[in-house]
Image (cartoon, helix red, strand yellow):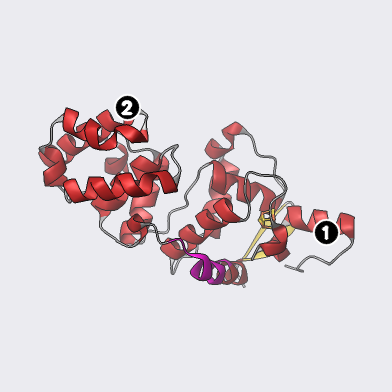
Amino acid sequence: MQTLTVKGHLVQLPVFRAALLAWGRENFRPFPWRLTNDPYRILMAEVMLHRTQARQVVPIYGRFIAKYPDIDALGCTARADLHEVLYSLGLRWRIDLIHTMAQVLVQHHHGQIPQDKDVLLSLPGVSEYVASAVRCFAWGFPEALIDTNTVRVAGRLFGLEVKDSSRRNRTFRELLTALVDQSDPRAFNYALLDLADEICTKRRPPQCDRCPVAVWCRSACQGRAAQDTMSCHPG
Ligand code: SF4
């Protein structure tokens, strides 16, 4: 069986992924950008979600897509009109980047969202996280999504110290990449994001008693060992 071992802590990947996917199906949050595989809509949502709560983005995304259903509609809008639609998101620089991105997509990419990661990354406003999210959620590429939330979960799972710089750390990148389910990366990443937001939260303590992967989690095991309540999964 495919396994992942970090500092002697072993996770059997197929069972771990199956547990997270099952939990993800039960707890899937049907945000509108999750109910499409249109790369344009996913790209716009991911840029809007940068440093903004999903619940705050929902109504703005709805108005935005109603007004700009495709890249051609967005590409010919005036910057001031776009600000009017998106101003409540805050981060005005982000709105300017969306406007510039639309111009670039229309003028240099025939209004198509590129699949190639390097080309995606060359677009204004597209970070590593956004490029990976678009490739995974639109086309099903098995990309790891690396941000403060997924890094927090990985750190707790494997008992690794998490710092501000961990998002750029190779160990975390490799760990999160190895965890991704290759047959359904889209569902896996949604489940991981939902787990990070609902269960393995920034708040202390995380809700380990509700966590579908607690038996493989080093932090949870250490907590249990202290309480002597139950043993950890053998691997
Ligand atoms: Fe996070 Fe607890 Fe789950 Fe570990 S068991 S991943 S610490 S919620």
Quarter of the picture holding the N terminus = bottom right
Q: Earlier in the sequence, mark 1 or mark 2?
A: 2
Question: Residue 47: x and y, percent?
Answer: 34, 41
Residue at position x 17%, y 41% in the image: 105
Find the distance from the CA under tag 1 to the CA under tag 2. 46 Å
Q: Nearer the viewer, mark 1 or mark 2?
A: 2
Q: Which residues are magenta?
A: 20-29
Residue at position x 54%, y 72% in the image: 22
Instruction: State yes or no: Cβ of the residue under disc 2 lies below 8 Å from any atom of ligand 1.
Output: no
Residue at position x 58%, y 45% in the image: 151
Task: Kindly tell me whether residue 115 is visible in this rendering.
Answer: no
Question: Residue 222: x and y, percent?
Answer: 81, 54
Q: Is residue 95 above or below residue 26?
A: above
Amino acid carrying label 2: it is Arg
Q: Is residue 141 above or below residue 65?
A: below
Quarter of the picture holding the C terminus = bottom right
Q: Please tell me whether residue 230 belongs to the stretch shown in magenta.
A: no
Q: Residues within 10 Å of mark 1 (few under 14, many from 20)?
A: some
Q: Residues within 10 Å of mark 2 (few under 14, many from 20)?
A: few
Q: Is residue 226 left or right of residue 123?
A: right
Question: Residue 102: x and y, percent?
Answer: 19, 38
Q: Is residue 143 above or below residue 79?
A: below
Residue bearing the label numbered 2: 92
- Which corner quadrant of the figure contains ligand 1? bottom right
Amino acid carrying label 1: it is Arg
Question: Residue 226: x and y, percent?
Answer: 88, 54
Magenta stretch prevailing secondary structure: helix
